[in-house]
């Protein structure tokens, strides 16, 4: 009886220990606007795995996909008031909160993925993460959306003249809107969760997003033409709420940063994979894809957007990025 009592006591203690551990697990809400099969979801799962492993289960991560917590701008506001803990977002709406990041949204700024990743992982990327910290947000790591291309339901676009008059949904980003104005298109800013219906109903003719997003959102159902303009590199970022993050110990904060870096690595690998395989998939689904675009006339057409940008935001950051090219 003594042995069975002892075993009973040990089992009860173990169960009580597990209950305490389960109770102590802090639930982290992570939101993004893309589907559960997207590159953002790949990044969210990598973050979850790494954080849960580093913290030995002290944190659990609940991923909310497809804009179920709202559009990117709304979710960033949610971080500031503490209704969301973490968000993976493009820089699209970020300049409205942290104007210093607008420089990253200039068209044709980066030539390729290597250059963009190198800048974001270097001194300038770190400096911008620091600036984000001055605006009631925590910049955890730069991740990736991809080079953006133009789709539309009206016609093949091979030159700026073909884009003339097209109603193109843009992100809620003044630099992108200006670039599309300069191209002669009619930029229509809109939150991403409203976009599919707007394309379906013909409220807008086209939109622009990376291959990753065009694949993840089945845009072939509402868009016939894709032009690989690669007109802007679209960085993404994992942002945290200061209300959640400031409550963590230094060690815990480092777990979050490390998990965010693991998330960025997984996302970038998925972006690279889809850059290789995505176009064939879009063609199989009926899109006509213009791969051979002469981008020089597009670059020339958007040049005034640079002048407007520097008159409003200065040229220091821009020159540093160009010097790294
Ligand atoms: O087009 C956008 O708003 C963004 O590229 C998206 C699809 C929400 C990903 O960040």
Image (cartoon, rainbow, N blue to C red):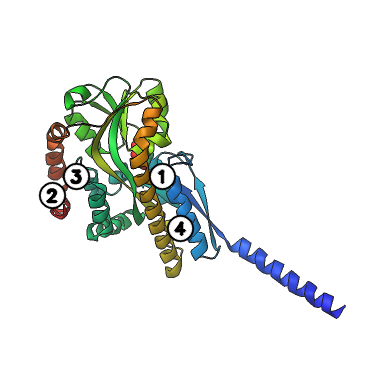
Residue where numbered disc 4 is placed: 244
Q: Nearer the viewer, residue 151 or 76?
A: 151
Q: Secondary structure at mark 3?
A: loop
Disc 4/disc 3 C-alpha distance (Å)? 34 Å
Q: Secondary structure at mark 4?
A: helix
Disc 2/disc 1 C-alpha distance (Å)? 32 Å
Q: Nearer the viewer, residue 210 or 101?
A: 210
Residue where numbered disc 2 is placed: 315
Residue where numbered disc 3 is placed: 109
Q: Secondary structure at mark 1?
A: helix
Residue drawn at point x = 62 percent, y = 65 percent: 21
Q: Choose mark 4 or mark 1, whichever is in front.
A: 1
Locate the N terminus and report the quarter of the image it occupies: bottom right
Please provide percent x and percent y for residue 266.
40, 52
Is 119 placed left or right of 90 in the picture?
left
Residue drawn at point x = 44 percent, y = 69 percent: 251
Residue where numbered disc 1 is placed: 39
Please provide percent x and percent y for residue 319.
13, 52
């Amino acid at each position: 009886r003594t042995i069975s009592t002892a075993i009973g006591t040990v089992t009860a203690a173990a169960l009580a220990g597990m209950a305490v551990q389960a109770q102590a697990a802090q639930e982290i809400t992570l939101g993004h606007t893309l589907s559960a099969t997207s590159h953002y979801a790949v990044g969210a799962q990598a973050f979850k795995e790494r954080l849960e492993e580093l913290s030995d289960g002290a944190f659990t991560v609940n991923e909310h996909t497809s804009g179920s917590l709202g559009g990117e701008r709304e979710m960033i506001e949610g971080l500031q008031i503490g209704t969301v803990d973490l968000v993976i977002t493009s820089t699209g709406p970020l300049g409205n909160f942290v104007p210093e990041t607008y420089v990253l949204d200039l068209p044709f700024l980066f030539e390729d993925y290597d250059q963009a990743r190198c800048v974001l992982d270097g001194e300038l990327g770190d400096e911008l993460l620091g600036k984000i910290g001055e605006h009631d947000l925590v910049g955890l790591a730069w991740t990736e959306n991809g080079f953006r291309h133009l789709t539309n339901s009206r016609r093949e676009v091979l030159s700026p003249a073909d884009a003339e008059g097209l109603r193109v949904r843009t992100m809620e980003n003044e630099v992108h809107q200006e670039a599309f104005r300069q191209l002669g298109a009619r930029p229509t800013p809109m939150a991403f969760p409203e976009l599919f219906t707007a394309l379906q109903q013909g409220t807008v003719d086209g939109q622009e997003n990376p291959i990753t997003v065009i694949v993840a959102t089945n845009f072939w159902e509402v868009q016939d033409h894709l032009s690989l303009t690669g007109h802007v590199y679209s960085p993404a970022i994992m942002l945290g709420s200061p209300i959640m993050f400031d409550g963590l110990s230094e060690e815990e904060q480092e777990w979050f940063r490390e998990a965010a870096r693991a998330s960025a690595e997984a996302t970038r690998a998925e972006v690279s994979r889809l850059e290789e395989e995505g176009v064939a998939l879009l063609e199989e689904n009926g899109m006509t894809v213009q791969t051979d675009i002469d981008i020089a006339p597009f670059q020339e057409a958007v040049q005034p957007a640079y002048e407007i940008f520097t008159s409003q935001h200065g040229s220091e950051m821009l020159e540093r990025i160009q010097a790294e090219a």
